[in-house]
Image: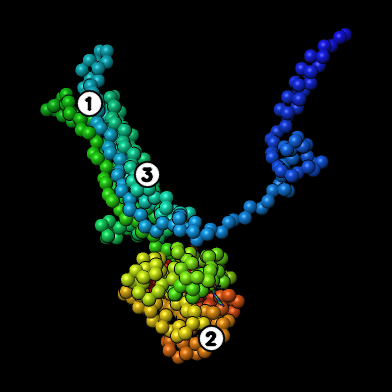
Amino acid sequence: MTVSLGLVQRWLVQDVIRMSRKVPKLRRVSGCTSGKAVVLGHYYTSSSLATKTKEFSRKKEISEKKLTRHFIDHRKVRLIAGSGGKGACSFLSEPRKEWGGPDGGNGGDGGNIVLKVDQQVKSLSMITPVYRGKDGESGGSKNCYGRSASTTYIPVPVGTIVKENGKKVADLSHHGQEYVAVFGGAGGKGNRFFLSNENRAPLSATPGEKGQERVLQLELLTMAHAGLVGFPNAGKSSLLRAVSNAKPAVAAYPFTTLNPHVGIVKYQDHEQVAVADIPGIIRGAHLNRGLGISFLRHIERCRFLLFVLDLSIAEPWTQLQDLRFELEKYEPGLSRRPQAVVANKMDLPEAQENLTELRCREKQRVIPVSALTGDNVEELILHLRELYDGYLEAEERVGAKPMKW
Ligand SMILES: Nc1nc2c(ncn2[C@@H]2O[C@H](COP(=O)(O)OP(=O)(O)OP(=O)(O)O)[C@@H](O)[C@H]2O)c(=O)[nH]1
Ligand SMILES: [Mg+2]
């Protein structure tokens, strides 16, 4: 039997195609030449090998620059609810039932727009300037009613305040909480609705109502139990790093922190205390010096305050007076919340002398720590717990539900 060379070539090609089809999934791994796997050039089929060579993906730290781009804490939003569907005008006409009467159905209701708190959402950056609800469907003949439109949900972070013309209209502070911002228009009536003994063949049908329209301001107030308040470079972010799992940026220049960061301090009995680090405040911040005091809104919600002072500078107690003055300017009474003074940078030589002087001048408890070396941070963590327990008791006394993390 003679087999032509062309035929042999075709068989070979078909074999190769068949083999390649049997290969389940091809993965590209560079630099792998192990004999265990079926290596086809750069591709191989062994998944176990792939997992071996795969690098562990580590969660990247978000830089302050990136965070600033993504962190939005106020937004103006226009909400237009859906309009109702129009009612139909029609008459039933069938064989042997020529004058069947009016059978125009009603239109469906327009969709509401609801702000819904979602724990996963951390800023208002995803909020667009305009939202339109869905319109209801129109009614049809044969008494068919139009379908009502579904509700549009806008996810917002925990701690969102809703304002209209500067007046607070809603405070969304719990996961899953909803606020119906605008109501959809009612559906129109079909001509069947107008059927009466006086009018057996109504020709009127109404259009659907327009949906409600509102312009709202959304403001985000960071939710935390404790707020770190201090001058720039006092070591607030270093302190938050030392006591919690948060990793805010730390640098030797003022105004490193531009956005609030929240860290969680975990205790053995599973209680968790949230601590917020906010940008530094300077004297005259209420006159918009430094970064201003607009971000002080983030400590409005904090139940107790930790004033952080850099004890290595001359006369650190003047900073404390300035901080309290600025807080009072922002909201009267804010500086009188339960508080403690954290005397930071105790590892530096000048600090010890300043601490003695500060203790003489200050009525509140002063906790000397070093965020850099971690010295005496335990005392701060324990005192934080005391403040937290005091807060829980106070809430229980008035029958309110305490904020838990
Ligand atoms: N020696 C010493 N240096 C510290 C200590 N805590 C913080 N620092 C340093 O102080 C500088 C400022 O620290 P940050 O934590 O960024 O200060 P901050 O208060 O968050 O500053 P802003 O974000 O700008 O408001 C950094 O160089 C820190 O390394 C400390 O306990 N001892
Ligand atoms: Mg900072």
| Nearer to us in this view, 226 or 114 | 226
Residue denoted by label 2: 350
| Residue 45 vertical position relative to residue 313 in the rendered view, above or below | above
Give x and y (percent) for residue 185: 26, 41
Residue denoted by label 3: 152
Of circles 1 and 3, which is in front?
3
For marks 2 and 1, the one nearer the N-term is: 1
Give x and y (percent) for residue 344: 52, 79
Q: Are marks 2 and 1 in contact (CB under 8 Å)?
A: no
Q: Amino acid at mark 2?
A: Glu
Which residue is at 27% across, 15% downward? 94
Of circles 2 and 1, which is in front?
2
For ligand 2, tell me if the residue under mark 1 lies within 8 Å: no
Q: Amino acid at mark 3?
A: Thr
Residue denoted by label 1: 89
Q: Residues within 10 Å of mark 1 (few under 14, many from 20)?
A: many
Give x and y (percent) for residue 232: 46, 72
Which residue is at 73% across, 24% downward? 17
For marks 1 and 3, the one nearer the N-term is: 1
Residue 128 in sight:
yes
Q: How is the image coloured?
A: rainbow
Distance from Cα at disc 2 to Cα at disc 1: 88 Å
